[in-house]
Image (tube, rainbow, N blue to C red):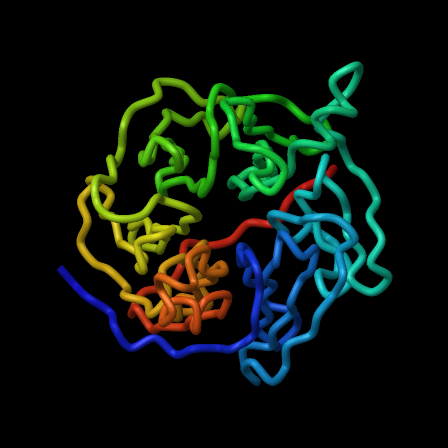
């Protein structure tokens, strides 16, 4: 098994950071990292490093951002926000709703208690986004939902009865989708229809029995899943056959999400919830880590709204 120990630390403190989108903005490689609980986005020029960090107040928790086809991503991105999908203006800090998650009598209660967690874009430009009970408000239950925003703006519920849905990816053949189920310590696979976006035939892809809980994940161009283990001080590499074949060891216990920029894997982290017990972990918590893993990430797709 390959072990990657030498990660470079990019120091900027976040309470609960996730970095889900890396993209080319003109000639510059730029990445966005979300501090969900503090309602902030950090924009980083990867060519300049941590000294280039810019902070934007998002006004509400944002769990995931993606590029929009035909839209300048230095100005506007698509966001999984507190209670729906928005077009978020990076210059003004304003949200324009594309679709809200909740309606009718349930809207007020669910808007108060729930928020977006993670998401991704499939090869057809559909935006898959997840909402769950915010643990800052109350203990999560199996009320979480995986939504799919189709081109044209129709929001559909595609998966339910899960507590904390997390990383979501598709294989290179585009016939299988993977979804992390955090509290069950599993990654599920589904048969995927790229024409309709429908999923079926849910099967267990990976069962985690070691330390930590699976959080966000990403996929490389060889089909390996890189899975963050919250509480496990590492990111593990899982082969297309569902076997652990590598790991990135970290000096803090709570990595949250990996994201690729070239062959560099950037890994976000959260605050240490037991700083007295784990002082070393606490000293590195909330920072961004970078390690060259020798393989590129799977191609990113922009969301299509029309």
Visible residue check, residue 263: no
- Most foreground residue, 10 or 16: 16
Look at 69% across and 50% down and name the residue there: 68
151 is higher (above) or lower (below) than 278: above
The quadrant where residue 109 appears:
top right
* Residue 287 in the figure: left or right of residue 93: left
For the point 35% across and 18% down, the residue is 201
Q: Is residue 88 left or right of residue 44?
A: right
Which residue appears farthest toward the left when viewing the image?
A: 1
Q: Position of residue 226 (x, y in %)?
A: 33, 53
Vertical position of residue 107 compared to residue 270: above or below: above
Quarter holding the N terminus is bottom left
**Viewed as shown, does residue 274 lie left or right of 91?**
left
Image coords of residue 246 (percent x, y) = 20, 58
Residue at 46% over, 55% down? 273
Task: Indicate the position of residue 96 as horizontal and vertical percent values.
Answer: 84, 44
Q: Is residue 137 left or right of residue 212?
A: right
Which residue occupies the extreme top position in the image? 105
**Which residue in the rendered view is the most extreme toward the front?**
276
Answer whether residue 145 is visible to the viewer in this image. Answer: yes
> In the image, what residue occupies the spot 30% across and 54% down?
232
Q: Quadrant of the C terminus?
A: top right
Q: Position of residue 193 (x, y in %)?
A: 45, 25
- Nearer the observer, 244 or 11: 11
Q: Quadrant of residue 175?
A: top left
């Amino acid at each position: 098994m390959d072990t990657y120990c030498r990660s470079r630390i990019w120091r900027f403190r976040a309470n609960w950071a996730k970095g889900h989108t890396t993209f080319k903005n003109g000639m510059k490689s730029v990445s966005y990292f979300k501090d969900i609980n503090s309602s902030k986005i950090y924009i980083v020029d990867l060519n300049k490093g941590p000294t280039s960090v810019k902070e934007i107040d998002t006004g509400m928790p944002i769990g995931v951002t993606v590029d929009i086809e035909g839209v300048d991503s230095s100005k506007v991105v698509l966001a999984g926000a507190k209670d729906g999908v928005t077009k978020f203006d990076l210059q003004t800090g304003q949200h324009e709703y594309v679709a809200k998650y909740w309606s009718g009598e349930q809207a007020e209660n669910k808007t108060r208690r729930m928020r977006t967690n993670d998401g991704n874009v499939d090869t057809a430009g559909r935006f898959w986004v997840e909402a769950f009970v915010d643990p800052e408000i109350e203990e999560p239950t199996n009320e979480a939902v995986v939504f799919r925003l189709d081109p044209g703006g129709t929001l559909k519920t595609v998966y339910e009865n899960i507590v904390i849905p997390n990383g979501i990816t598709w294989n290179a053949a585009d016939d299988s989708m993977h979804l992390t189920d955090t509290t069950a310590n599993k990654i599920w696979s589904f048969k995927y229809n790229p024409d309709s976006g429908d999923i079926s035939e849910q099967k267990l892809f990976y069962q985690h029995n070691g330390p930590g809980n699976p959080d966000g994940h990403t996929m490389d161009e060889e089909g390996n899943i890189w899975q963050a283990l919250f509480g496990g001080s590492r990111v593990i590499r899982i082969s297309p056959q569902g076997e652990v074949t590598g790991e990135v060891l970290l000096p803090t216990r709570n990595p949250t999400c990996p994201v690729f920029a070239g062959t560099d894997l950037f890994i976000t982290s959260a605050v240490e919830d037991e700083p007295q017990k784990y002082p070393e972990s606490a000293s590195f918590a909330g920072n961004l880590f970078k390690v060259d893993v020798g393989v590129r990430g799977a191609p990113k797709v922009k969301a299509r709204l029309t």
